Every structure is written in structure tokens, then in C-alpha cells.
Image (cartoon, rainbow, N blue to C red):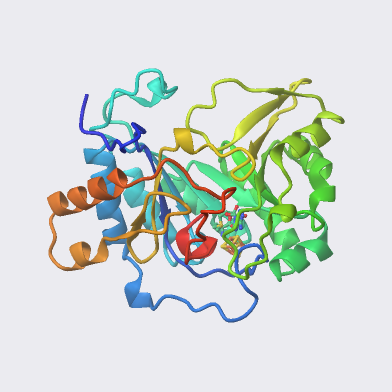
């Protein structure tokens, strides 16, 4: 058993979410305001070498074996395949033995990380092949309406066709699985639940329905805008019967298989059924802040170490200290909940 990142509640960190930019070519209403986002100065954003350094410490020293690139929109960062290739070359070391955590199959020596990305998909028609060739293997593509006008109203971009082309391009490039992320909002797109399920079955993609979380920049969130996971499952089950998949482990999505064998869906019920007890994630923002929770109000700035001559030992110590402060879970449903100062695109969802 090697060195592992274990928080004070006994959870082992295995998954690193890296935001490569805070910028985006969409303005999804649940994430960014249409006007007035203030972007980070480019010099504040970590270089690929700096990102690789943090990732190397996490992967090679602490046994983190899963990395997801996100943002903002990761595909707007120039030369993204170069970063993917750097991360794909890392080899997992350290780590806990993880007996019984459902990941035994990924635990042979010298293996690479499980490399994934979340994207709005609009540029995948052009980039999917290059990303795959660089070593990216899994993609989550966000899409919140299958209706052109509504897609435009939600994202402020008339880009449904590009996103659908992007999904096809991802499947054609060999990404497996391709998942489709759909954030449901009451009164906005909750009448499309079954349409999305049908779309997923027909296209061979796994739709993951995500509850709307209080991380929008425009403060539109309210509890009655959230469509609870149980309601989503019931709506689909009535048309295409479902069966829950056992053995969720640390995955945020509860998976359900179609009884007729035509694929599966996932439901991320962060608000109505939080899964913090099994959380194995930490996050690195585009400007080098380490966060131990999506909803964290406290961050560790790694840039002074990265740019001020700190060694890998210093980085490792800062990461250990941050993980040591990880809380038991968020408190969205309690009066004590404090909204983080950053919105989703500034954290890296
Ligand atoms: N731009 C990429 C995209 O949209 O896929 C990656 C970044 S985005 C912040 C990551 C994921 O967070 C997306 O699936 C998006 O739908 C989701 N998201 C953003 N704001 C959200 C919110 N307030 N509640 C729930 N999910 C949200
Ligand atoms: Fe951009 Fe993704 Fe946020 Fe939409 S959800 S505005 S695509 S970062």
C-alpha cells in the first residue's frame, strides 16, 4: 500500500477535476450571466506545465487514478490535445489498497489515468479525433434541450445542431462511453425527460440527468426549481421500465438500466440525495486554487508554490493539508448553507 490522500472522514481521494479555463462560448442560464462575466487575466491561468505538475503529484505520489478536464468550456483553451497527451503519459503510483471500493480492475502497476472531459460539445466535430488520438477516452457532453429554440433560450447560442454533430463525432472517434449531461430545471425543460431518454436509447449515449445546483452566477436557483431525481426516474420508468444498477461506489450518478437492455441512464441528485459520504474528488481551478468540494468556501492557492520555486514536497504538503480540511458534506438543504463565492464555470463543474 502506497501513500494515499485520505481525509479526516476516511474517504480516499482518487479523482482530480481540472478546470483549464474559466472562459466559455455559451452562456447557459444556470451557470453564467449573458453579459458581464469578468474573465481571469491570461497570466493568472495555469500553464499546461503547471497543470501537469499538480496532476503528477496527485497521480504518481498519491494514486489519484482519474482525471476529468472541465471549465468554463475546456475546448476553448488553445492546443488542448497537448495537455491531454501530457496527462495521458502519467503513470499511477502510491494510493491506498482500496479493497472493496469497486476499482480493483484499475489497480495494476504502471497504468495510466482514466482521462475524461466535460464539454458543451459545440467544437467536437472539429476536435474529437485529435482529443482521442492524444489519449482522452471518455466524454460527457452537456445538452439541456433537444428543441432548437429552447436550446437557444437556455444557452444563448443557436448551437443545438453543432452539439448533436459533436455527439456523433465523439461516438465515431471511438469515445466510450459518451454521456450526455442534462441539467433539469422546473418549468424550463422538465417536459423533455422522456425525450432525452428516447434520444439516448436511439443514439447509444447514456443520458445523465443532473439536479440544478445553487452554483449559477445569476442567483436564479431556488429549491422549487430543482427537479428531484426520484421524479426523473419515475417519469422514465413509466415509459421505458428501469432497474437500479447496484454497486455505485464513489460515482455521483445512480445508474439505472433499461429492462429491455437498450442502455442506461444516470441521475445525479446532488440536492435531493447528496452522495458526499462517498466523495473521492478534489478540484483544481483554472488559476490554481485547490478545492476539496464543489461547494467549498475555503481554497488553497497553489500558484505561489508553482511560480515561487516550491518543490514537489511543498505541493504535496499543501494538497494533504487541503484534503485534511475536507468537510463531511455540503449543506444545501440546511439553513447553514453558504453559497460559494464562485459560480460553476469559475470552479470547474
Ligand atoms: N462547459 C462544459 C459543459 O458545459 O459541459 C464544462 C463545464 S460545466 C460548468 C460542467 C457541468 O456543470 C455541465 O454539465 C453543466 O451542465 C453543469 N452545470 C453548470 N451549472 C450548473 C448548475 N447550477 N447546476 C447543475 N449543473 C450545472
Ligand atoms: Fe459554458 Fe458549460 Fe457553463 Fe454552459 S455550463 S455556460 S457551456 S461552462
x, y percent for residue 9: 35, 34
User: Would you place residue 185 above or below residue 273 in this image?
Assistant: below
Q: Nearer the viewer, residue 233 or 167?
A: 233
x, y percent for residue 288: 32, 62
Q: Is residue 303 left or right of residue 155?
A: left
Picture quadrant of ligand 2: bottom right
Q: Is residue 191 left or right of residue 271?
A: right
x 12%, y 64%: residue: 309
Where is residue 205, by image quadrant? Answer: top right
Q: Nearer the viewer, residue 269 or 136?
A: 269
x, y percent for residue 111: 32, 31
Where is residue 252, by image quadrant? Answer: top right
Where is residue 174, by image quadrant? Answer: top right
x 80%, y 58%: residue: 188
The residue at the far front in this view is 335
Q: Would residue 258 be visible to someone looking at this image?
A: yes
Give the quarter of the figure containing the N terminus. top left
x 54%, y 57%: residue: 127
x 29%, y 50%: residue: 322
Q: Would residue 72 be visible to someone looking at this image?
A: no
* Number of on-image labels: 0
The residue at the far top in this view is 100
Q: Is residue 123 left or right of residue 12?
A: right
x, y percent for residue 173: 57, 44
Amino acid at each position: 500500500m502506497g501513500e494515499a490522500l485520505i481525509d479526516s472522514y476516511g474517504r480516499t481521494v482518487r479523482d482530480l477535476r481540472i478546470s483549464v479555463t474559466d472562459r466559455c462560448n455559451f452562456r447557459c442560464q444556470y451557470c453564467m450571466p449573458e453579459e458581464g462575466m469578468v474573465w481571469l487575466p491570461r497570466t493568472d491561468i495555469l500553464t499546461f506545465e503547471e497543470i501537469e505538475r499538480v496532476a503528477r503529484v496527485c497521480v504518481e505520489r498519491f494514486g489519484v487514478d482519474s482525471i476529468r478536464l472541465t471549465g468554463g468550456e475546456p475546448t476553448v483553451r488553445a492546443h488542448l490535445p497537448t495537455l491531454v497527451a501530457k496527462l495521458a503519459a502519467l503513470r499511477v503510483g502510491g494510493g491506498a489498497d482500496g479493497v472493496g471500493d469497486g476499482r480493483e480492475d484499475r489497480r495494476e502497476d504502471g497504468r495510466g489515468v482514466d482521462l475524461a472531459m466535460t464539454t458543451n460539445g459545440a467544437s467536437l466535430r472539429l476536435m474529437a479525433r485529435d482529443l482521442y488520438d492524444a489519449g482522452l477516452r471518455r466524454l460527457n457532453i452537456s445538452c439541456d434541450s433537444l428543441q432548437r429554440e429552447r436550446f437557444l433560450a437556455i444557452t444563448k447560442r443557436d448551437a443545438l445542431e453543432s452539439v448533436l454533430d459533436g455527439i456523433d463525432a465523439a461516438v465515431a472517434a471511438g469515445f466510450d462511453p459518451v454521456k450526455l449531461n442534462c441539467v433539469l430545471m422546473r418549468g424550463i425543460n422538465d417536459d423533455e425527460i422522456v425525450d432525452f431518454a428516447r434520444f439516448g436509447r436511439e443514439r447509444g449515449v447514456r443520458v445523465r440527468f443532473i439536479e440544478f445546483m445553487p452554483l449559477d452566477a445569476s442567483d436564479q436557483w431556488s429549491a422549487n426549481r430543482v427537479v428531484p431525481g426520484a421524479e426523473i426516474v419515475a417519469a422514465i420508468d413509466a415509459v421505458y421500465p428501469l432497474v437500479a444498477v447496484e454497486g455505485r461506489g464513489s460515482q455521483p450518478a445512480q445508474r439505472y438500466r433499461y429492462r429491455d437492455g437498450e442502455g442506461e441512464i444516470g441521475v445525479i441528485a446532488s440536492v435531493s440525495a447528496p452522495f458526499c459520504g462517498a466523495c473521492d474528488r478534489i478540484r483544481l481551478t483554472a488559476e490554481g486554487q485547490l478545492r476539496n468540494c464543489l461547494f467549498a468556501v475555503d481554497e488553497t492557492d497553489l500558484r505561489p508554490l508553482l511560480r515561487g520555486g516550491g518543490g514537489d514536497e511543498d505541493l504535496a504538503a499543501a494538497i494533504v493539508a487541503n484534503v485534511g480540511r475536507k468537510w463531511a458534506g455540503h449543506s444545501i438543504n440546511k439553513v447553514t448553507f453558504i453559497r460559494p463565492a464562485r459560480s460553476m464555470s469559475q470552479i470547474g463543474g
